[in-house]
Image: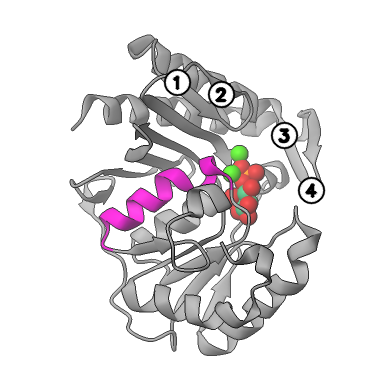
Amino acid sequence: MHPMLNIAIRAARNAGNLIIRSLQHVEHLEVTTKGRNDFVSDVDRLAEQEIINTIHKSYPEHAILAEESGTQGSNDVVWVIDPLDGTKNFLHGFPHYCVSIAIMVKGKIEHGVIYDPLRDELFTASRGAGAKLNDRRLRVTKRKELEGGLLATGFPFKYPQYFAAYLETFKAVFPQVADIRRTGSAALDLAYVAAGRLDGYWEIGLEKWDLAAGVLLIEEAGGVVSDFTGGDDHFNSGNLVVGNLQIQQQILDSIAPHLTDELKK
Ligand code: IPD
Ligand code: CA
Ligand code: CA
């Protein structure tokens, strides 16, 4: 295993343990609002600090891009961190959230870790070396048609300007599949696509820390990721469609007629 992946796993497990310990006090946590429907608690901040401390113990010179504290340093290696993906679930006691850490080298995601502390599930990937759940190799599903498929999606709760167009994409996809989940953790949705638990997924307006580790997991599990036009600008646009080759294309084809100009990226 690459030494940086090893540190990412250590950092994710440390943060996961901190999140689980704080479950006892979840109703007393001070919660502040960062933006529309966007909340943060001390647990997010403490977990993030724990991750950064773990990284900097081994790699003091590496740069950080983290959800709660922003950017730190400048280096070819950037650690992209979501300390708690699924904050709203966590705050409501809805047991589905994770830690997501990706390592970018010269602008390319090389390693990714997504850790679900409640199920003790550790999803890992390194470029060219495959994706794993704990010790098991991951593959995306083999489904060829949307029919019978199980997808996940995210609702654009921060972006009222996209509600109408998003619902049109939902209306276009929903009748074609067996069902659609909205789990509240984009990173776990991506890990589940990599693990073959979901056939595909789409969401508008993700942040870099929501998707960085997950897209590498999917690619290393044989899947395909793109922005809403089928291009590779999802890291910047935050608009993401994933699945195996066939399912990803069918989601893209289904949503294309409903995208406003602003969403064609
Ligand atoms: C959110 C979750 C959610 C997704 C949002 C993200 P957070 O991350 O991943 O599923 O729909 O776009 O912002 O705020 O819980 O880290
Ligand atoms: Ca997130
Ligand atoms: Ca978060």
- Kindly identify the residue that appears in the image at 69 percent across and 25 percent down: 42
216 drawn magenta: yes
Percent position (x, y) of residue 217? 34, 51
Disc 1 crowd rating (10 Å Cα; few below 14, some 14-19, many 20+) is: many
Element carrying mark 3: strand
| Residue type, mark 3 in image | Val
Q: Which residues are magenta?
A: 207-222
Which residue is identified by label 1?
A: 63
- Marks 3 and 1: which is nearer the front? 1
| Residue type, mark 2 in image | Thr
| Residue type, mark 4 in image | Asn
Percent position (x, y) of residue 198? 42, 68
Which residue is identified by label 4?
A: 37
Element carrying mark 2: strand
First reached walking from the N terminus: tag 3 or tag 1: 3
Measured in 3D between alpha carbons, the distance from the residue under mark 3 to the one under mark 1, in whole angstroms, is 23 Å
